[in-house]
Amino acid sequence: MQNNLLNEDNENDFQLRALIDQYASHWKWFLLSVFLCLSIAFVYLKLATPQYQSSMTILVKEDKNSMLSELSAFSDMGFGGGIKNDIDNELEILHSRTLVESTVKQLNLNVSLFVKNKFTTRELYSKAPIEVSFINRKPSYFESESELILLNKGSNSFSLTEKIVEERPLIIENAKNEYQFGETIKTSCGDLVINKSIPYFSTNKLWDGESEIIIRLNQVADVADGLRTRLKVNPVSKQSSVLELSLVDGVVEKSEQFLDHLVQIYNNNAIEDKNLISGNTSKFIAKRLALIAEELDGVEQDGESFKTTNRLTDIESEAKLFIEGSSEYDKKGIETDIQLSVTNSMLDFIKKSNNSDLLPSNMISKDESSSSMVDSYNQLVLERNRLLKSATVENPSVIKLDQQIASLRANVISSLERLRSSLTIQKRNLNSQEGLIDSRIQKIPSQERQFRAIARQQKVKEELYLYLLQKREETAIALSATEPIARVIDAAKAQKQPVSPKRAMIMLVGLILGLLIPFSIIYLIDLLDTKIKSRLDIEGKTLIPFIGDLPTSDSYHEIMHAESRSSSAEAIRIIRTNLEFMISKETDGKAKKIFLTSTFPKEGKTFVSVNLAATFALSGKKVLLIGMDIRNPRLDEYMQLPERGLTNYLSNKEDNLDNLLIKQEGYEAFYVLPAGIIPPNPAELLMNKKIDTVFKTFEDQFDYIIVDTAPVSLVTDTLLVAKYADCFVYVVRANVLEKRLLNIPNTLYKENKLPNMCVLLNDTDSTKGYGYGYGYGVNVEQHQSWYKKFKKS
């Protein structure tokens, strides 16, 4: 298990190394591509206009009583109480087309000045040598798009050329060849005035008369769209109302001024909105005050009429007095009833009493005369009773006292009757007064209800009147003390380093592209190239054993010799060794028969056959090379061979096989049996039983028999003789055979039509990593000679 894992790791390492070597062989193209891409990146950085980012931060104030509507003044009444500055709304307002267009118009950003040099066109702004202004602008000014080319003609003159670029151009009326600075030029968009820039010339800068200045008039909407695309408005954090505004532009002064004026116009618009709302609110309050004052006056007149009609001043106070008076009258009535009862009781008692009875005293405290007469009466009674103790009733003193008592009793009775009459009248008057007060008290609730309705209306109108007066003052104060909605925390300031182009990024992209372009091209070429390139293409598509690859030979038509140390020679030796393992079984002393074939002609099977036979011969073995590709014999390209050969024997024109063998010079036991004359019936000849005789005759004489057969995809010759082979070497030539045609050897291998089959890859390019690299042990001179030949190829 461990060995399998190691083998898989080694195979992966080999594939990765082969892939790296495949691309590393094109290092010159990579180097050239990197150089070109970096050069283009460098030129781009030199010619590109640096873009700088300007940014500013503002604090958007939140109004507790926002003046976003006329009802906001009455937020304490529940109207417009939910109105406040939403940060999301302010973001949209700051990024709105209307606000940006207003800023463009205020700064005249639709008029741009450019100066042209050999390679680039640079925009001028505050450093421009001229000032361009349009007066008496026409509506078409904001919708025109044109270019004017200005060329300095002298100290105070210039020429102006129109360049129409859109459907709505700027047209100069009564155009002429030369104009003066400060001259009014009539155009279709308004009066154009061009002056020299005082700040520019005050710095002792000279304007090159040959330099052209391009005056470009753009549509305001297009300029605004471009700025809105580059304008970023973002909150600093979710919890705060601080906003950051940023703009990327090639002219630092323009971007800074744009941001500053954008916020300024934003504040001015907000102030105008507030003032407009405050003015409308003030007018509304004034109208309401006049109406409420009129209604309040009517209600007050109704209250006055009600009090006059009912003769009232203060209902509560008068009601209190009436109640108190009713209580007093009630109290006096009770007292009068008591005195009247006491008087009646006194009268009854006096009328029933005799001269010896005393009358109750202190009963009638309210009438002093009656009380004094009662006291005098009681004194007379006491005097009489005292005399009767010592005298009789006939006593003159007693009789006199009786007369006095009777007279005084009559006076007391008369006085009490007068008192009773007086009390009766008093009681009647008290009852009458009490009834009058009670009637007045009964009317009070109705009068109070009616008056309260009038007072309620009066109070409502009065409070509303006072409320409107207060709001009028508050609105007046708000109108006179309107503050900006946004406070600038950090004014617009551009970064010192440009945000684009980023030098490191551009150079890195250039480097990556320089590597990616040749890589992609090579990958695409390899992807579209369906030819077999290396053993990886074979091993991944077939199960046939792979015995080695043969690199491109410098001497294609030369046969390998003992002193050969080339990469091809070493590859042949490795293939020879691998073939030994393929046919290592015992053959009972008979020759090992190795057949070679291919899919198509010209894949190098004859070259491999010759050199494989040579390398076996150089190892001390007795080798026979048979040319059995009788349709297209190619052995004579590598060695001197007669026309007579195998076909002569098979066609009965020659009986002795030994006479057909040709010994190769320079080898101890290397013999060749040529194919012979091309016959008209090659398939029938190969089906001849004499083929058996050929192999039986030579398998006892030689150690190895190498057979060069015909391609299997074109003719059936090879399949007819396949049964005589101990091993079949299937030669595949790199960059010739397509990968899809590997199905042919795969089919032959699966169906076992070619016994003991193996694959050999011919003509690989070791410089691209397809070969192993051969020639270990070569001396320095041979290595240098081989390397020079390899470089030339």
Image (spheres, grey):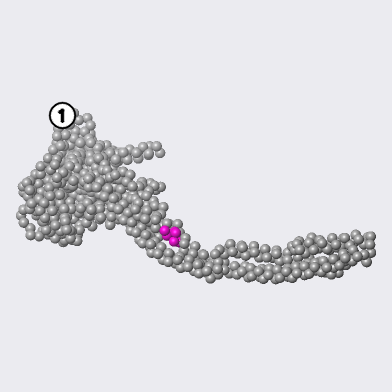
Expressed as whole percent of the image width and height from the top left, the position of residue 147 reads: 14, 55
Q: Secondary structure at mark 1?
A: helix
Which residue is at the front of the view, 489 or 739? Answer: 489
Quadrant placement of the N terminus: top left
Task: Classify 185 as above or below 305.
Answer: above
Which residue is at the front of the view, 389 or 520? Answer: 389
Residue at 83 percent of width and 68 percent of height: 407
**Residue 711 can be seen, yes or no:** no
**Residue 560 can be seen, yes or no:** yes
Task: Classify 584 as above or below 304.
Answer: above
Residue at 10 percent of width and 48 percent of height: 212
Residue at 86 percent of width and 67 percent of height: 403
Quadrant placement of the C terminus: top left
- Residue furthest to the top in view is 780
Q: Which residue is mark 1?
A: 781
Number of marks in the rendered image: 1
Residue 716 left/right relative to 434 = left
Q: Taken as a whole, is the magenta stretch helix, strand or loop?
A: helix
Quarter of the figure with residue 534: top left
Residue range highlighted in magenta: 464-469
Residue at 18 percent of width and 28 percent of height: 779
Expressed as whole percent of the image width and height from the top left, the position of residue 295 reads: 44, 67
Kindly identify the amino acid type of the residue bearing the numbered disc 1: Glu
Expressed as whole percent of the image width and height from the top left, the position of residue 621 reads: 23, 35
Label 1 crowd bin: few (<14), some (14–19), many (20+), radius 10 Å: few
